[in-house]
Amino acid sequence: MIKISELTPKGANLQNSDLLEISEFTADGYSSKSITGAEIITAAQSGLQPTLVSGTNIKTINSTPLLGSGNIAISTNPRTLASVVGLNLTGTTNQISASVLIPAGTLVANNSIYIRNLLTKTAGSTTSTGRIYINTSNSLTGATLIGTASQSMNGSIYFQRFERSFYFDGTNLNVFNPSSAISTDLTVGTLSLVSLNPAIDNYLLFAVQNSNTTPDNLGHKRVIVQIYD
Amino acid sequence: MINLTTIKGGFVMRELEYFFEGEFEILDETQAHVPTDKGVILCDTSMSINEETYENINDFLNALYA
């Protein structure tokens, strides 16, 4: 009889074709038990991640394999700060339809902010006005006006695309004349400077005001705010 | 509540000085746009002026521009 510890090491990796056989004495003589190399390998690999093969069992990003060390830079310019849906509101008071927080530390010098939103009404025939403000709290009180949409949302005109781009110079937002009531700044106009402290939270406030109490119900729909480096 | 402290040709809000530029615009009975050197500020009657409150925007603006 040879002890297992006295066996000569195989000296090579286990192969599928290897056979491990053990015999033991029994009352009737001895019995043998065996297991193949393939069975041992299968049992040992159970539950383990198979070797990764790019494009086979791990996806690629724009055909760039993810295997190996290092970083894969992904473009984040522009980055979308928010995409929100505002409320359609009745009433003649200037009130917030949607708001977007610009967290402290988000903006740095030479960033620009691009705002695209859709102003909609579902009822009414009198003038309604959409505006954009910025404030250090989520409130219109003390807010600074940074954009005014066309006010001609009367009759059956229920839709307006409202866009603005703002440039941040490190101290001020450079904005198209905020009192000029126009849908887009894809034109020329007076430059206005609006003080902004990027080290604290700031809120973009999307407000609506109807000239008639009801049924006019202007709202900022699908407000998208992007920041460009 | 935000308090505005009047100064010559403007006011102080949140420790910043604002100087009037152009004509104010009344939005409704409680709100107005006040053009300043730091942009057009929305003022409303929830603000106080020199610790006094006003019930309508006309009285508020009279006190602010006094």
Image: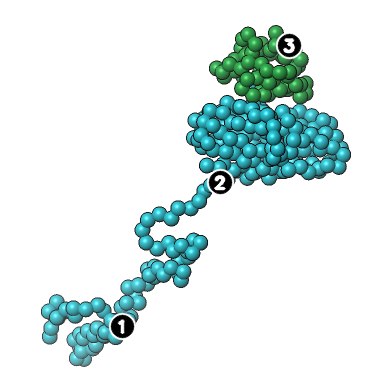
Chain colours: A cyan, B green
Q: Amino acid at mark 2?
A: Pro
**Front disc: 3 or 1:** 3
| Residue at image point 32% right, 73% down | A44
Q: Which mark is residue A16?
A: 1
Q: Which mark is residue B62?
A: 3
Q: Nearer the viewer, residue A106 or A110?
A: A110
Other-residue count near label 1 (Cα within 10 Å), few / some / many at <14 / 14–19 / ≥20: few
CB within 8 Å, label 3 to label 1: no
Q: According to the image, label 2 marks what residue?
A: A78
Q: Quadrant of the N terminus of chain A?
A: bottom left
Q: Amino acid at mark 1?
A: Asn
CB within 8 Å, label 2 to label 3: no
Label 2 resides on the chain identified as A
Q: Amino acid at mark 3?
A: Asn
Label 1 resides on the chain identified as A
C-alpha gap between disc 2 and disc 1: 54 Å
